[in-house]
Image (cartoon, rainbow, N blue to C red):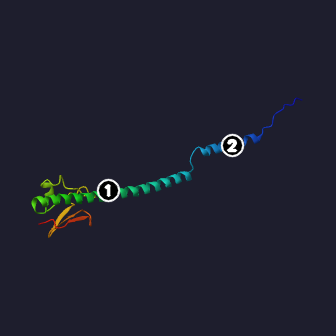
Amino acid sequence: MVTQDIAPVRREEKEPARPQAIRRRRQAGFTLIEMLAVVVILAIVAGVGFVVVNNQIENARVNTDKANVRTIADATQRYIMDKGAAPTDVGDLVTNGYLAKAPVDPWDSTKTDAYSISTTDKNVTISGPKPGDSLTLSNVLP
C-alpha cells in the first residue's frame, strides 16, 4: 500500500488572518461615535463663531450710529454759524448742502428719518434711532 504524505492543514496559520482582515476593515472608516464627536465639536465652534460675529456686527452698528450723530452735529454747527438759527430737521442740512445725504439707520436701512434735531433755549440736541444715542450742543443758538 502506498501512503501519501498529506500535510495536515494548520489552523493556527489561517486563524490569525481573519482578525487582521477584520481589523483592516474596521480601520477603513470612522465609527458613529467618532462622527458624532466631530459634529458636536463643529457645532460648538459654529456657535461660538456666530456669537463673536454677531457682537462684531452690533459694535459696527453702534459705531456707525455714533459717527452719524457726530456728522449731523458738525453739520448743524456749520448751519447755525451760517444761518444764525438751528435746522428744523436733517432734511434742512441736506437741502442746504451741509450733508450730502441723510444718514441711514444702521439697524434698519430703510429708515432715512431715524435722526432728529430738537432745540431748547440755546441748546440743540441730535438724537439717533436708539434711546440714549444723542448729542447736545450747548449754547450754540443766539
Q: Residue 58, position in %: x, y?
A: 33, 58
Q: Secondary structure at mark 2?
A: helix
The image shows a total of numbered marks equal to: 2
Q: Secondary structure at mark 1?
A: helix
Quarter of the image that includes the N terminus:
top right
Q: Residue 83, position in %: x, y?
A: 10, 60
Q: Residue at x 56, y 53 (%)?
A: 33
> Distance of mark 2 from mark 1, alpha carbons?
63 Å
Q: Looking at the picture, does residue 90 appear above or below residue 28?
A: below
Which label lies toward us, 2 or 1?
Answer: 1
Q: Amino acid at mark 2?
A: Arg
Please name the residue that numbered disc 1 is placed on. Answer: 60
Q: Quadrant of residue 137?
A: bottom left
Q: Are marks 2 and 1 in contact (CB under 8 Å)?
A: no
In the rendered view, does 132 fall on the left or right side of 2? Answer: left
Q: Residue 142, position in %: x, y?
A: 11, 66
Q: Residue at x 69, y 43 (%)?
A: 18
In the rendered view, does 39 fall on the left or right side of 94? Answer: right
Q: For label 1, count other residues whose C-alpha is less than 10 Å away and answer few (under 14), some (14-19) or many (20+).
A: few
Q: Amino acid at mark 1?
A: Ala
Please name the residue that numbered disc 2 is placed on. Answer: 18
Q: For label 2, count other residues whose C-alpha is less than 10 Å away and answer few (under 14), some (14-19) or many (20+).
A: few
Q: Which mark is residue 81?
A: none
Q: Quadrant of residue 10?
A: top right
Q: In this orientation, which residue lies closer to the viewer: 14 or 88?
A: 88
Q: Residue furthest bottom?
A: 121
